[in-house]
Image: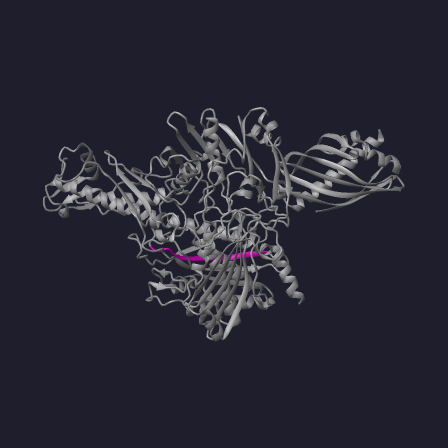
Amino acid sequence: MKVRGEQTLPLEPTAAWELLLNTDALAQAIPGCEGLVPLGPDEYQMKMKIAVASIQGLFAGKVRIADRNPPNSYRLHIEGQGKLGFVRGSGLLSFSPDATGTRITYEGEVQVGGLIASVGERMLDVTTKMMIGHFFNNLAQQAHH
Amino acid sequence: MATTTPTTPTKVQLKVGQRLRRQEDPRLITGTATYVDDIKKPGTLYAAILRSPHAAARIQALRTEAAAQAPGVHAVFTGADVEGVGPVPCAAALPGLRVPKHTILATNRVYYVGHPVAVVVASDRYLAADALDLIEVDYDPTTAVADPEKALAAGAPAVHPEWPDNIAFTQNTVYGDPNKAFAAADVVVKQRIVSQRLIPTAMETRGVVAEWSPGDKQLTIYSSTQIPHLLRTQLAIMLGLPENHLRVITPEVGGGFGSKLNVYAEEALVGFVSMRVNKPIKWIEGRREAFQVTIHGRGHVDYVEMAAKKDGTITGMKIKIIQDLGAYHQLLGPLIPTLSVLMLPGLYNFHDAEANVFGVFTNAAPTDAYRGAGRPEATHCVERIVDILAAKLKMDPTEIRRKNFPAKDAFPFTTATGLAYDSGDYAKPLDKAMQIVDYRALRARQAEARKQGRLMGVGISTYGEICAFGPSPATPAGGWESATVKVEPTGKVTVMTGASPHGQGQETSFAQLAADAFGVPMDDVVVLHGDTAVVQYGIGTFGSRGTAVGGTAVHLALQDLRAKCTKFAAHAMGVSPDEVSFEGGIFTSPKTAKTVTFQEVALEAYVCRNLPPGVEPGLLVTRFFEPSNFAFPFGAHIAVVEVDRDTGEIRIERYVAVDDCGKVINPLLVDGQVHGGVAQALGQAIFEEAVYDEYGNLVTGELMTYAIPKAHHVPEIETERTETPSPVNPLGVKGVGEAGTIGCSPALVNAVVDALAPLGVTHIDMPMTPQKVWRLIQERSQA
């Protein structure tokens, strides 16, 4: 499944870049995040509760940051699994200044498997977009504080 | 026993042939029936199963410690713990068949999404499910292939590494000289025809309750199954238990359709767990779990060719069947496409044919018998290709069929594939169906509609099927059926059938047989089934065999018991048995003008005040009926449809089903079977398709993404019958459980193709979703 979109944060690019690499901020912003523990430089262990349609459960996995190019872009790799299935993906986040702060565009590919795939791509697509939306809204709120 | 002087007996109306409502319905529609999930044993623990999210992966590590310590959890078992349990059985004995070792839990690899990996047992089902989250499995995913044609392609990933070509078996069968027939043909038509993978979707998912009794070392398994006795035998082998230490009870079954004609890993697993933890264990399959792991049906890609003369005489047929078998063989899986081969000639009189079957492994749920099992696929192919031939020759589809039927005096008719069709008059149901729809007027109306640019179509299907499974040599585990009939001292009649009805209504139809045999009311008869401690051995209900084979066994036992009753009655009246007549529950001796009632005979048979010489006490008989052949029902279905040009939606204006299932015991039950069968085939024709993505994920894994027909999608079904008794059994019955499913899908597809014919459409594959039909209309309209 292709994931692509853009969001804005009311911060200038360097601050946005830093926020998007701040463990506490991320842990608070990721919907359903139940723990984000650094494993080493640019690598985290994450537990996340996911609910898609009537399927919900815990995913455990890793988040890894690569190809750092501050404050312009980095690549995010995720992988997680649980009894509901697995999620694997990677995407490029690019930061560029705009009138209200920073425009963040993301583009990547996510593979979802197991039981959670049974709800079909249409539902997964909507849910993924919704979760990404929540994530950036949460970050934006943190930026205001 | 007292005898009385006869009064003039009133003519008794026999129950057989009457449209009687089902004895079993009151409990089913008032919610008082007992299903597996209603079984509540004190101290029950609940099992939840961890399943693979990957279609293909190596298991590198499996950690269960955290789950084992979770609240309420009693035990966790993995593949290593169940090594002593035998493999899930496959009864298909095909030459050269590759049979992967099918352990009840995965060991070092998983082969499909849903593959069971571990089981957690906890004090309630929620705690068990929660604990699954705490099991950590390190998977190393490998490339999967879930499409059978892709699995056959060079370089495809190997489902089982030991068999890189993904071929489980091939079967080539040549009948007569097909190459000569094709070389000499005036016309040859070809079509690739898909019978897509379907998910049976019984209303009740599977479920197992196992209770180990350590004192007497008895294991009781409650399972939602169609085959309690075969299951008991197989579970005894798998669990290493003496068979007489195992009892299988099948309470009410909320739908099977073949999906419960199996021996599943979970049935052994739950038994194993109960023996290990010494507690009753319950496992109820979730709906999504059912979608992933209970067998799927169909899964054919067929390449069909038909040869004919200019006048429409069919001279030969060739088929290549690619059967998607999934990752493992369940009980009968690989046999199903071989039934398609047998059914290939349909109702048509030609003798040169060739069939090539490729049974293909894929990283997907196993396929196996689903209502019709191989015969709907074959019938769909035959009935479609005959229509394609008719279109090519510009013949009316009813005419080409009629031309190729064997004559009604040609029975028993030996088909190209060597079956001996027992009895038939194939033009009769076609005539009747055409008369019901007023075929000539219908075609005139269609011509008018076409002038107006409307897409109206008429679809014909004249199907045949193989029923009443079957002679034992032609079946993997015995094809007979058994019955015990017991007359109680009070004159009540208990029938124990080895067929294990689960919605077919045999508690009613068998009670009709018994009521007529003894002249008792229906309510005096109880039909018991589905408990291996109550019922003598039996085979089960599938392949439209319940009445033709199981009912015949009941009939034979009833005949024997009636004869024994007659001996008691004759002795009491002081005459010989051949001087006794029987009607309406009363034995009469015209010579001595005496009577005794059936109830008086019943009591005497147990109290034995005056036992006839040479006659044993008691009234209990067990009979086994071994059929000499299958029975071959047939029929004609006509669908009238109109396709909405703007939306691609199909409106079914009329659906007429004229079926010939031989003698009918209860017309209401037959109608019910036809209705259900048609609805199920309508599901395949228009709505249903199990779809795996390129990674082997089942993306139609729940009722939101897998469409089954709802009540409002099903048109009024006009049923009619012709009656050609079968000579194979004394009841003259043939079977009707699968007729609707087999006859319907080609009728609907033929109707839609006919509707779209003005646009140049010659074929459409199922499911004919509005989107697919709309696209076709758009493409052809622009062309």
Q: Closer to the camera, B527 or B240? A: B240
Q: Closer to the camera, B524 or B317? A: B317
Q: Is residue A53 visible?
A: no
In the displayed structure, B698 sits above or below B643; it is above
Q: Could you say where residue A19 lies in the image, as x and y percent from the top left?
A: 83, 33
Q: Closer to the camera, B28 or B694? A: B694
Q: Could you say where residue B365 lies in the image, as x and y percent from the top left?
A: 54, 46
Q: Quadrant of residue A7?
A: top right
Q: Is residue B326 magenta?
A: no
Which quadrant of the rendered structure holds the N terminus of chain B?
Answer: top left
Q: Quadrant of residue B286?
A: top right
Main structural element of the magenta stretch: helix, strand or loop?
strand
Q: Is residue B606 visible?
A: yes
- Image label count: 0
Q: Is residue B724 left or right of residue B396?
A: left
Q: How is the image coloured?
A: one colour
Q: Is residue B496 left or right of residue A73?
A: left
Q: Could you say where residue B184 lies in the image, as x and y percent from the top left?
A: 47, 75
Q: Quadrant of residue B607?
A: top left
Q: Is residue B62 left or right of residue B441?
A: right
In the displayed structure, B452 sits above or below B685; it is below
Q: Could you say where residue B743 lies in the image, as x and y percent from the top left?
A: 46, 57
Which quadrant of the rendered structure holds the C terminus of chain B?
Answer: bottom right
Q: Residue furthest front?
A: B162
Q: Which residues are magenta?
A: B649-662
